[in-house]
Image: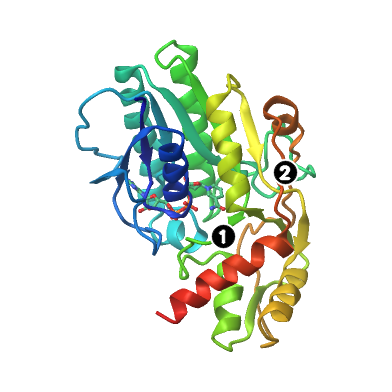
Amino acid sequence: MSRALVTGGAGFLGRRLSARLLDEGFDVVVLDNLSSPSPLGPPDGATFIEGTVVDPPSIDGPIDRIYHLASPASPPRYLLDPIGTLRTGGEGTRQMLDLAEDRNARFLLASTSEVYGDPTEHPQREEYTGSVQVTSTRACYDEAKRYAEALTYAYHRTGRVGEVRVVRIFNTYGPGMAPDDGRVVSNFINQALAGQPLTIYGDGSQTRSFCYLDDLIEGIWRLSASDVDDPVNIGNPEEMSMKELASVIASEISDTGIDYRPLPESDPARRRPDITRAQTLLGWEPRVGFIDGLPPTIDYFRSLADG
Ligand SMILES: NC(=O)c1ccc[n+]([C@@H]2O[C@H](COP(=O)([O-])OP(=O)(O)OC[C@H]3O[C@@H](n4cnc5c(N)ncnc54)[C@H](O)[C@@H]3O)[C@@H](O)[C@H]2O)c1
């Protein structure tokens, strides 16, 4: 049986990816420091090891694949610990690449659309070099991921890790998200469920594209099973302004009004993946539109709120 290590496997995406790998017949080991776990906990059926990728515990035995997802992932979390975020992206990724080299494992890095920063090109193709303000507060995350990509390709080019995959993940939502992780979909749903006004930063014209969890996991699975070693965007090109998002959520739950606040520094104005590469090389495209992915997500948050 093949064996996979999933770092960050107790988180929103990692637990679902681990479940998929178990379904595909992998023996799964999860390494997670539980700094921002999913309320649903680590996946059943996986071996759980508590620890940090920055100074990892030793993991015995063969490892065929490493899925490296461990990182603070939402702005409130990475802004709380910018140095820790850079260390996780830098030192944590180096540690996991060393492990991949040692076990001759295929290495998949969970990168992000944030490598494009506040993009001047729209939609964003993988060739786009990005527009990150290196001195901004958000740079701790954006640059950590850019460095992690560069490090992954350096290990690959020097022949130390033979097989690498890099997925650039765009905003993803669905059951399993932590209610307090500060991403806009979870914020809006939880505010509406609590009868509070939805917080919009700026005038609400900024856009995001939201990918449903199941689609994202399918994309990661296909990429990791492929021989594509260039970075691949995985996300849903359906683009929505924050005002539109607020009105969809108000119509699904209840209209609790809007509380406008100042726009945070370096908040990207627009974000939409060009998914041509994923379509062409992986035969992947999203199947779940926002209107279909929203109800199970609302049900999930409602069940958490009801205890
Ligand atoms: N969800 C998204 O929309 C999105 C978008 C772009 C990129 N990503 C990337 O995908 C990955 C997973 O994101 P997520 O949404 O599941 O976030 P999450 O916060 O739910 O999960 C991240 C997991 O990593 C763990 N972790 C953090 N630092 C660690 C460390 N030093 N050592 C070990 N474990 C550590 C946390 O405890 C958590 O369980 C991250 O790398 C994130 O940057 C996610």
Is 12 above or below relative to 105? below
Q: Is residue 51 visible?
A: no
**Structural distance between the alpha carbons of marks 2 and 1:** 19 Å
Quarter holding residue 262:
bottom right
Quadrant in which the C terminus appears: bottom left
Residue at the spot 39% in from the left edge and 14% down from the top edge: 160
- The single residue placed furthest to the top in the displayed view is 159
The amino acid pointed to by label 1 is Gly
Circle 1: element type = loop
Residue 286 x %, y %:
70, 45
Task: Residue 265: name its quadrant.
Answer: bottom right
Q: Quadrant of the N terminus?
A: top left
Give the class, few, some or many, for how many residues have Cα within 10 Å of label 1's Cα (few <14, many ≥20).
many
Q: Position of 27 compared to 161: left or right?
A: left
Residues at circles 2 and 1 in contact by the CB criterion of under 8 Å: no
Q: How many marks?
A: 2
Q: Nearer the viewer, residue 105 or 145?
A: 105
Identified at 31% across, 43% down, the residue is: 46
SS state under label 2:
loop
How far from the left and from the top, in percent, is residue 209?
A: 71, 54
Instruction: Determine which residue is flagged by label 1.
Output: 174
Confirm whether residue 156 shows in the render. Answer: yes
Label ID, residue 273: 2
- Side of 42 relative to 129 (left or right): left
Name the residue type under label 2: Pro
Q: Identify the residue at horizontal 64%, vertical 69% (top origin).
A: 295
x and y, in percent, of residue 89 in the image: 42, 40
